[in-house]
Image (cartoon, grey):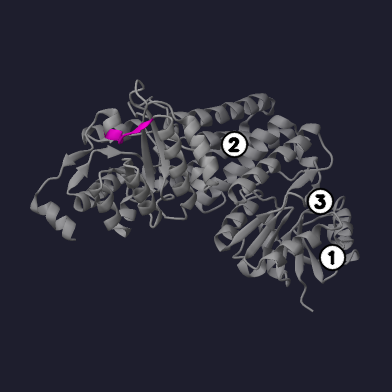
Amino acid sequence: MKPRFSVVIPCYNEAGYVADALHSLREQSYDSEYEIIVVDNNCTDRTADIARELGARVVTEINPGVCNARQKGTQASSGEIVISADADTTYAPGWLAKIDQIFRSDERIVAVVGPCRYIDGPLWGRAYARLLFGAVNLVYRATGRTCYATATNIAFRRTCWSGYDVNLTQGGDELDLLRKLRRKGRVVYDNTNPTNTSGRRLTRGLVYNLFVTLLVFYLLAYFVNRLCRRRVLGSAPAYRNNRSASSRHMQAAASAVLVALLLLLPFAQPRHYIARTSHSVVNYLQVLDSDGHRMIVLSLAGLFVAGLGAYWVLMSPYSQLFGPYPWRGDRTERVVALTFDDGPNEPYTSRIVDYLNSRNVKATFFQVGQCVERFPNTTATIAATGHVVGNHSLTHRFGTYLRPGRFERELERTQQILRCRLGKTPALVRSPWLWRQPTLLRMLSKRALQPVSGVFCHAFEVFQLDAATIARRAVAKTRPGTILIFHDGFDGRGGDRSQTVQAVKITTEALLAQGYRFVTVDELLHVPAYHQARSSHRDLDDCVS
């Protein structure tokens, strides 16, 4: 009989833990069939023998790494639903039954995720787990989106699994799996069904775990290896491996330098830049004095702070370091400018426009070129009814900033698209994610284009919180002269914006009741909204094509 569940446990020298994990799985109150698969990932102790003695099926994976082990275990599974588990983790008797109950409640559910709790180790570690999964639960309750999964507690339908990316490391396997599953259907987060895991990985201290284990080996390794499409940055040392302190700190130092390299990505060709540099960095650090570990940790902390500073300079709505990027206008009158990014996106853009027209409110729409090509009549209608249209790039892809000249070509192509639809050329531009850098602002200035920033109505409005929450935050942020940012699309790809439509109505009515007058951005900043379109034969040919 085909089992309902297959529980996959990757193992590398887990003789001291695996028996407890297997006993807890065997003692589940779940009545139907399920199998336990232990993956022997080059164990040199009795892990595999213990697993066989306790009735688990043992398969072997000679390629080292937890992603390879999970891949092999899942391929060997025969259950309808596969559960990723860990050898140093125990499971409450009702754990499996709760997962089954959620899956049976809705066939559209493709995965069920739960939290983990540290049962030993330092007090800060237990508090950290509570805070981390508490935040995941808050995001899920607010948005319906599961933003993080632990490999000790994730179950997914076998038919929705497309394989692990074996170029990734621990941390990366669960993040990448979650990303793929969200594309397939609904991922449920159940905060009431935790697993209990060992705190052995926390024994190196708070600073090391925060800045090395989490920041470098989990998050940085995930993004770098995905970016380069191969394993550039390896896994963290196994916690039961007795490596020397110098070896651990050498690897941490290499990671610190790679963090610094990552901060330079906006000014370089990322994939080739990291791939060429990383090996020479590691070779250089072979001679690192192990006594320098304090400096390494301090450097990591400094780089983390530098990363936050880089975000402020390059993407904060309020940064003016590289030149004027206005986020508000004249503060002497109760005026506010409503702006909308990432559209047009039907039917939501038209719903917003129809409502604004009914209240005689004018707004500014920063539009993505490929979306204008998708809904050209919407753009024409927006301008014809007195609203202002601005440029918001052609594709809304972050990678355009990383290639010299790419964003400039996108900007010019979008200007051409909008000129053909409007008969005039926009003079206002807002770069995606409010990105700014010296070369970008100089390029805009040469073209007499006015960059526009603003204040996000709500930090998570793009994820479609409920309309009342978005509107409440938008009203609270509004001051005389505010440029308020909503999204009638999402990342240039469309999507459901029904909550934004309702939030715009609630916000507008509340601000009207407070005596605010609505203006377009050009009125607020006292700049032109459009340049007169050129009437050359080339322009006409471009429009026809």
Residue 509 is covered by the magenta coloring: no
Q: Position of residue 201 (x, y in %)?
A: 76, 41
Q: Residues within 10 Å of mark 3 (few under 14, many from 20)?
A: many
Q: Which mark is residue 254?
A: 2
- Alpha carbon of mark 1 to alpha carbon of mark 3: how far? 18 Å
Q: Which residue is mark 1?
A: 30
Chain part drawn in magenta? 516-522
- Is residue 183 positioned above or below 143 on the image? below
Percent of width and height locating residue 527: 24, 31
Q: Is residue 520 highlighted in magenta?
A: yes
Tag 3 secondary structure: strand
Q: Single out the mark in the foreground, 2 or 3.
A: 3
What's the amino acid at mark 1?
Answer: Tyr
Q: Residues within 10 Å of mark 1 (few under 14, many from 20)?
A: some
Q: Would you name the residue on which mark 3 appears?
A: 89
Are the two marked residues, 2 and 3, in contact with CB atoms closer than 8 angstroms? Answer: no
In 3D space, how far apart are the residues under numbered discs 2 and 1 (Cα atoms)?
A: 47 Å
Q: Is residue 392 visible?
A: no
The image position of residue 19, as x and y in percent, is 88, 56
Res 196 seen here: yes
Point 76% across, 71% down: residue:
4
Q: Nearer the viewer, residue 86 or 463?
A: 463
392 vs 159, left or right, is: left
The label nearer to you, 2 versus 1, is: 1
Counting from the top left corner in percent of width and height, residue 397 is at 40, 48
Q: Quadrant of residue 12?
A: bottom right
Q: Secondary structure beneath disc 2?
A: helix
